[in-house]
């Protein structure tokens, strides 16, 4: 797979405190969906790291160990702007202090975004997000996922930079 | 399955989005938010398909799906393993889901553009809690259960009380007042409105409201548009929770339509009736036999204000209101004792009445303005114009419903003319815009025109 890259505008959007979902599947193609808690773009947009809390990531980690296929969806609560990244896992490791700091920053960004639509900050403080694992993946394709007729259309040329 | 789907009903109200993961035949996973999963029965959920997107294609290739749903009250989560069974494109489930989408579509100006393609029915294979999602701290959210009325006896007594008041209402106007205020007093429905079909036109008009400050009478909604109009068209009860979320979702789709169609013209967004910041709404059709006699709507600022209990309860009360409306429309001309003294009480605004009011009737669209402000239109406007003119020409003070029915210029249909509703609407609009002119019931089927001001009448062809 030659792979799409994440352009700078899209990178800013992905790292702005939008909600993160991680999709995987097992050997029998039974899918799993789990919340991620923050992400960062690496290697000039060719790679992505997503933080998945240990507390609810067990099945996600098992699926990744089995086959490495992964989908990461991000969505902005106030206008539903959504993008999905498809890729393959390069590495999984335990989160360290840098990730812990990133998670705290992400929590503050989430609170700011979600309070606009009526979610109480206390919810985000109660989420059991630490410890987490860091899933690094190679970006292979980018898709528009905002609800509507364009959902599922490849993002090449818009958010993506080849 | 140890957990029952019924225990998770709050998760399917559409307040907190659910996560849905699917996987294609090629092994590519897909994960997305879905704004709502529909509870079908104890073993089935349905997904709404508005676009043939990746999720839908994946389900066709590989029936396995996993949903993560949240209880909107405390954010606890459950993982539900699903197996896609079939897509329904007609039938009761499809109709119910389509009507909900129609509400959002019409509010966001996308009626006919944004619609349900299919109800994708999935079997529930397993349910398990997502453990350790939340840290063990005291619940940050108040559970709602303590706000519910206590026990069945209380509900039964309350119902009895509402029933009695509805049955005793002497006329349609009182019926609406007592029914809406009893719903608030006894069961806490603080904001409610009652709409009736307006003549032969495909519109509904608000005949009464409770909890909104001003009367709201005269507000119109086309049948088929918005929550109330959709309920009238589909004749199905509908409950919406997390309204602001659903409308945001609708607006996102609207944006996408505009972008993908090069700015195609969509209709402007409709204002919601009633509360500007309503978070939950429930509306039900009032049916007498096969006939739609009205729509009852309640609203709340609490996204979880209404549940299955409210639906069941309002259905019972709604049936009684519908029967009473039918009865009061039918027997309004039978002789009855003189109206209650309250009806003849002097108007509280009489002391500060304007000395002179000027009415202008525009023939091209049958509407009346009073001192430059819109008052009323269509049949009620024609009725008022007739009354004012006969008063001026012949000094007539008292009128009968019968003489209105026999006047062909008013355009009342021969059967089911809803004359009583039209007179109520006229009375309410006068109270709001011109309290110096009153229509006071004398006895059933007769009323008096009372003027506490000089009036000036002018007729124009167009504005």
Image (cartoon, rainbow, N blue to C red):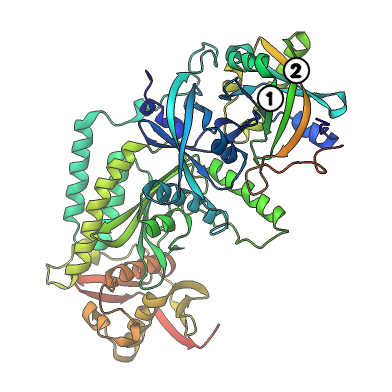
Residue A95 screen position, x and y as percent: 73, 10
Eyeballing the image, is B402 above or below A123? below
The quarter of the image holding the N terminus of chain B is top left
Eyeballing the image, is B114 above or below B133? below
Q: From the viewer's perspective, is A146 left or right of B446?
A: right
Task: Name the residue beneath numbered marker 1.
Answer: A70
Say which of B213 and B328 sits in front. Answer: B328
Eyeballing the image, is A126 above or below B153? above
Query: What residue is drawn where x is 51% and y is 24%?
Result: B75
Residue B346 screen position, x and y as percent: 28, 66
Instruction: Give the number of the mark in front: 2 or 1.
Output: 1
Name the chain under label 1. Answer: A
Name the chain under label 2. Answer: A
Q: From the viewer's perspective, is A103 left or right of B383?
A: right
Residue lying farthest to the bottom in this orientation: B393
- Residue B302 appears anywhere in the view: no
Disc number for residue A102: 2
Query: What residue is drawn where x is 79% and y is 35%?
Result: A10
Say which of B326 and A37 sits in front. Answer: A37
Per the image, label 1 sits on a secondary structure element best described as strand
- Residue B290 appears anywhere in the view: yes
Query: What residue is drawn where x is 36% and y is 24%?
Result: B4
Q: Residue B404 falls in which quadrant of the image? A: bottom left
């Amino acid at each position: 797979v030659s792979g799409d890259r994440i352009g700078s505008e899209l990178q800013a959007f992905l790292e702005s405190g939008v909600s993160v979902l991680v999709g995987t599947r097992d050997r029998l193609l039974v899918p799993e969906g789990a919340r991620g808690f923050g992400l960062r773009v690496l290697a000039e947009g060719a790679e992505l790291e997503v933080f998945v809390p240990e507390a609810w990531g067990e099945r996600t980690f098992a699926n990744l160990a089995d086959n490495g296929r992964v989908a990461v969806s991000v969505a902005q609560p106030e206008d539903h702007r959504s993008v999905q990244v498809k890729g393959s896992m390069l590495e999984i490791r335990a989160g360290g202090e840098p990730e812990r700091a990133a998670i705290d920053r992400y929590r503050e960004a989430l609170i700011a975004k979600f309070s606009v639509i009526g979610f109480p900050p206390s919810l985000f403080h109660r989420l059991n997000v630490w410890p987490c694992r860091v899933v690094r993946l190679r970006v292979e394709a980018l898709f528009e996922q905002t609800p509507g007729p364009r959902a599922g259309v490849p993002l090449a040329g818009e958010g993506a930079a080849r | 399955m140890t957990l029952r789907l019924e225990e998770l009903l709050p998760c399917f109200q559409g307040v907190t989005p659910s996560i849905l993961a699917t996987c294609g035949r090629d092994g590519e996973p897909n994960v997305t938010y879905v704004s709502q999963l529909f509870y079908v029965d104890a073993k089935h959920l349905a997904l709404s398909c508005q676009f043939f997107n990746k999720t839908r294609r994946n389900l066709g290739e590989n029936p396995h799906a996993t949903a993560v749903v949240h209880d909107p009250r405390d954010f606890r989560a459950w993982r539900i393993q699903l197996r896609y069974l079939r897509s329904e494109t007609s039938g009761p489930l499809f109709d119910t889901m389509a009507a909900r989408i129609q509400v959002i579509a019409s509010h966001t100006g996308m009626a006919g553009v944004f619609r349900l393609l299919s109800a994708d029915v999935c079997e529930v294979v397993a349910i398990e809690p997502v453990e350790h999602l939340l840290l063990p701290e005291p619940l940050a959210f108040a559970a709602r259960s303590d706000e519910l009325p206590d026990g069945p006896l209380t509900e039964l007594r309350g119902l009895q009380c509402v029933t009695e008041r509805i049955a005793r209402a002497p006329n349609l106007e009182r019926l609406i007042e007592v029914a809406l205020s009893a719903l608030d007093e006894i069961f806490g429905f603080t904001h409610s409105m009652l709409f009736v079909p307006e003549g032969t036109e495909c519109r509904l008009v608000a005949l009464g409201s409770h909890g909104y400050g001003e009367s709201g009478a005269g507000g119109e909604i086309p049948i088929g548009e918005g929550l109330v109009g959709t309920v009238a068209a589909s004749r199905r009860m509908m409950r919406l929770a997390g309204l602001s979320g659903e409308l945001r979702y609708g607006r996102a789709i609207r944006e996408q339509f505009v972008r993908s169609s090069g700015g195609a013209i969509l209709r402007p967004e409709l204002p919601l009736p009633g509360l500007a910041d309503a978070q939950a709404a429930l509306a039900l059709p009032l049916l007498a036999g096969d006939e739609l006699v009205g729509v009852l709507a309640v609203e709340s600022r609490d996204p979880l204000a209404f549940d299955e209990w409210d639906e069941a309860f309002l259905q019972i009360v709604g049936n009684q209101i519908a029967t009473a409306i039918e009865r009061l429309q039918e027997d309004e001309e039978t002789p009855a004792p003189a109206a209650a003294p309250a009806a003849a009480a002097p108007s509280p605004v009489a002391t500060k009445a304007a000395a002179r009011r000027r009415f202008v009737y525009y023939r091209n669209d049958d509407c009346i303005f009073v001192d430059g402000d819109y008052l009323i239109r269509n049949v009620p406007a024609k009725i008022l114009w007739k009354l004012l003119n006969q008063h001026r020409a012949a000094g007539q003070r008292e009128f009968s419903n019968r003489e209105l029915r026999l006047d062909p210029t008013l355009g009342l249909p021969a059967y089911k003319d809803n004359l009583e509703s039209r007179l109520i609407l006229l009375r309410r609009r006068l109270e709001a815009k011109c309290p110096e002119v009153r229509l006071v019931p004398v006895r059933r089927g007769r009323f008096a025109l009372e003027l506490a001001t000089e009036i000036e009448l002018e007729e124009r062809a167009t504005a």
